[in-house]
Image (cartoon, rainbow, N blue to C red):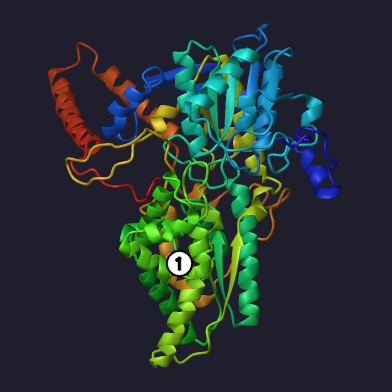
Amino acid sequence: MNADFGAPKELAGGLQQRRALYQPRLPPCLQGATVRAEYGDATTTIDSTCAKVIAEAFPRTFGQPLVSFLADAEKAAEERPPIRVGVVFSGRQSPGGHNVVWGLHDALKAYNPQSVLYGFIGGTQGLFANKTLEITDDVLASYKNQGGFDLLGRSIDQIRTNKQLNAAITTCHSLNLDGLVIIGGVTSNSDAAQLAETLVQNNCKTKVVGVPVSLNGDLKNQFVETTVGFDTVCKVNSQLVSNVCLDAISAGKYYYFVRLMGRKASHVAFECALQSHPNMLILGEEVALSKLTLMEIISKICDGVQARAELGKYHGVLVIPEGLIESIPEMYALIQEINILHNNNVPVAEMPSQLSPWAAALFQFLPPFIRRELLLHQESDNSAQLSQIDTEQLLAHLVEAEMIKRTKEGRYKGRKFSSVCHFFGYQARGSLPSNFDCDYAYTLGRISLHMIAAGLTGYMATVANLKDPVDKWRCAAAPLTAMMSVKRHLRGPGAIPIGKPAIHPSPIDLKGKAYELLREKASSFLLDDFYRTPGGIQFEGPGSDAKPITLTIENQDYMGDIEILKDYLSKVRTILKPGCSREILKAAISSLASVTDVLTVMSHPLNAELPLYHFN
C-alpha cells in the first residue's frame, strides 16, 4: 500500500490550482436544506426472460422501486442523527472520481456535522483489510476537481468470492457503517449488488450504493445515460487523434493506426471519431454483428487505402477500440481457449501445444508479438488483457503484407504503404476532469448520501436529462438488479438464460441516431480528409460546457418518459371514472387490449437474440 494516500499534495500552480477552486454546479433538487425521496413503481429487468433467474439470485433486493429525489421546500431542516459511511474506489481510475467523494462528504456534513466518512485505502483490498482514512475538508482540499484516484488508490476491483464478501461484512460491522459507496463500472456495480444482497441476508445494517464511474462509457442502460470520466477521456483522446490527423496530412506519406481504450465496447473510439473525423473507424459491434473475419477486415482497410491512393492521397488515420480483437469471431474463439487453459493453471509455455488444431493454426499464423500478448495472464474479471494486445500493430502488419501482395499482382500501383502505430490509453485516465464530469460526479456523490439516509441498498445513484443544463437534471436511484441480465448462448424459442446475473457492458446501438450520423459521414471521412480539431479541454468560456456528441444527440431521457407514461395513465383513470358512458368504456377496453397484446409480444420475443457482444 502507498503510505502517501490521502496526504496533501502540491498543486503545481496555474491550471491545476484554478481547477481546485471550481465549485461544481448542482441541480435544484439538491440545493435546499432538505431533500425528499419519492418512491415509484417496483422494477423488473430490461430482459423479461431473465427476471425469474435474477429474482431467485437476489430474493431480498430484486423488484425494488425507482426512487426520485426532490427538493422539499415545505419541510424545515431538522436535527438528524450522525451517520457513518465508507467509500471505496473499485473500478479503474477515471477522471472525476475524486468529486464523487467530495460531493458525498459535503452532503454528509450538511446532513449532520458529526457524521463520519471513511475512505478505504488501496481499493477493495483496503476494504477487506479495514485500512481506512477519515475524509475531512483538509484531506479533500488538494483533490477537488483533480484527476486520478490517488486520494485512496485502487487494487483488484473485485468483491466476489465468499472470503471477500465475508471480509467486507466484517469491516462494515467493525466500523459500524450505515452505508458503503462503491465507485466503479459494470463489474464493480455487479459486485455491489451481490454485496448488498449478502448484507441484507446477514442482517447487517450497512446500505450499499453504487456510483457509475468508468472511462469506458459502457455502463449505459435505461437508467444510466453515461458514466463519470467518459467525457474527459474522449476529449483528451480526440485532441490526440486530431493532432495525428494533422500530422498525417502534413507529411502525406503515413497511415496512422490508433487504438483507443474502452474495453469490450467501442464507445470511446466512437465518440472520438465523431469529434475528430479520422478517415476510418472500425467498431467492434459492427464486426461482431457482421461476423467479419480478420482477413475480411484487412481487405476492407486495404480497399480504403487503395481508394485514397486513386485520389493521390497516401496518408490516413484509422481508429480502433481495444476490444476489437475480441469481436473477430476466430480471435474470440482463440482467446476463449487460452482463457480456459489459464483457468486450468496450464503453464504459459505449454499453452500453444494444448490448443485445438484450428486454434493452433491461427495462433501460429499470428506475428510473434501478438502470440506473446495473447498468452498474458488474465485481468481480475478473468478476461484478456486487452490493453496489452497491440491490435493496431497486428492490423498494420497484415495491411502492409496485403498491399505488397496487391502490388505484385498489379492490382495496386500507388506508393509503398507505410504505417505508424499508437495506443492512446493511460494518457487520458489521470487528466483534469471536464466541467461536465466535475458537476456530474459531485452530484452523484451527494445523491449517494441521500440514498443511504433513505435506507436504500442495492441501488445506483443516477442522473437523468444530462444532455441539458445542470438546472434541468433529475436525480434518482435505480435498483442494481433492474440493470442486470443473464447471458444467453442459444438462439430461437428454446433459448434460456445461462450463467450468473450481472450488469453487462452496453454495446453501441447500431440503430441509434449517433451511429446513423456516423454512417452518413463515413464516405466523406474516408476520402475528403474532413478532419476536425477540437483542441484541449476548455474549462472556461465558449466550449467549456460541451458534452459528448453521443450523449447530446441520443434521446435517453428514460425517467422523463416514465413520467409521461404516468401522466397518460392518470388521465385514463380520470376519464374512466365509474359513471362514464358505455361507449367510452368499450373504446377504452378495446384500445387497452390492443396495447396489452403489443406490449406482451414486445416483452416476450419469440426469438431470443444473442447480444451484439461477447461477454465473458
Q: Amino acid at mark 1?
A: Lys
* Quadrant where the N terminus is found in the figure: top right
Quarter of the C terminus within the rendering: top left
Q: Is residue 137 above or below residue 243?
A: above
Q: Which residue is mark 1?
A: 521
Instruction: Residue at 69% x, 43% y: name it.
Output: 148
Question: In the displayed structure, would residue 572 be above or below residue 396?
Answer: above
Report x, y in % for residue 427.
67, 55
Q: Secondary structure at mark 1?
A: helix
Which of these two is toward me, 288 or 370? Answer: 370
Residue beneath the point at 44% across and 50% down? 346
Where does the image place residue 295, in percent across and percent down from the top left? 37, 72
513 vs 182, left or right, is left
Of residue 574 and residue 461, the one placed in the foreground of this image is 461
Image position of 445 (left or right of 54): right
Q: Is residue 551 visible?
A: yes
The location of residue 109, given as percent across then percent down, is 71, 18
Q: Which one is nearer the viewer's eye here, 140 or 335?
A: 335
Residue at image location 39% in from the left, 75% down from the top:
299
The residue that appears at 44% across and 28% down in the rendered structure is 480
Q: Position of residue 123 (x, y in %)?
A: 63, 33
Q: Is residue 282 left or right of residue 238?
A: left
The image quadrant that residue 240 belongs to is bottom right
Q: Is residue 185 above or below residue 274?
A: above
